[in-house]
Image: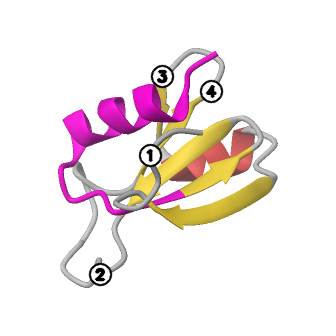
Amino acid sequence: MVTYVEALESAKSLNRKIDYCVEYNDGFLFGWKNNDDFVGGNGGPCIILKANGNSVNVIEYYHGYDAKEIRQFDTRKEKET
């Protein structure tokens, strides 16, 4: 099982703009609040699976996983959960 901190480190290796997280029962969605400049492709929001730490596409996650939201929070304020 991947911890929040491990998932955050993995997500930041994909995109350094990360400042928020939505925790789901089986994954973490990482992104950034002011994403007006995002037009798609690499570097967008990502999902890190709790079971194995793999990253998956957001669309794939919403269509292929359970996706029950637990909470939303600012990653700059959250330390460890």
Give the distance between the C-alpha atoms of the residues marked 3 and 2, in whole angstroms.
25 Å
Please give left or right for residue 68 compared with residue 33 in the image: right
Which residue carries the number 3 mark? 54
Tell me if residue 63 is in the magenta stretch. Answer: no
Which residue carries the number 4 mark? 50
What are the residue bounds of the magenta stretch? Answer: 1-21
**Disc number for residue 60:** none
Which residue carries the number 1 mark? 79
> Which label sits in the foreground, 1 or 3?
1
Q: Amino acid at mark 2?
A: Asn
Q: Between disc 2 and disc 4, whose residue precedes?
A: 2
Q: Position of residue 14 (x, y in %)?
A: 24, 39
Give the distance between the C-alpha atoms of the residues marked 1 and 3, in whole angstroms.
21 Å
Q: Amino acid at mark 1?
A: Lys
- The relative height of residue 15 versus residue 36 in the rendered view (above or below) is above
Which residue carries the number 2 mark? 34
> Which label sits in the foreground, 3 or 2?
2
Q: Amino acid at mark 3?
A: Asn
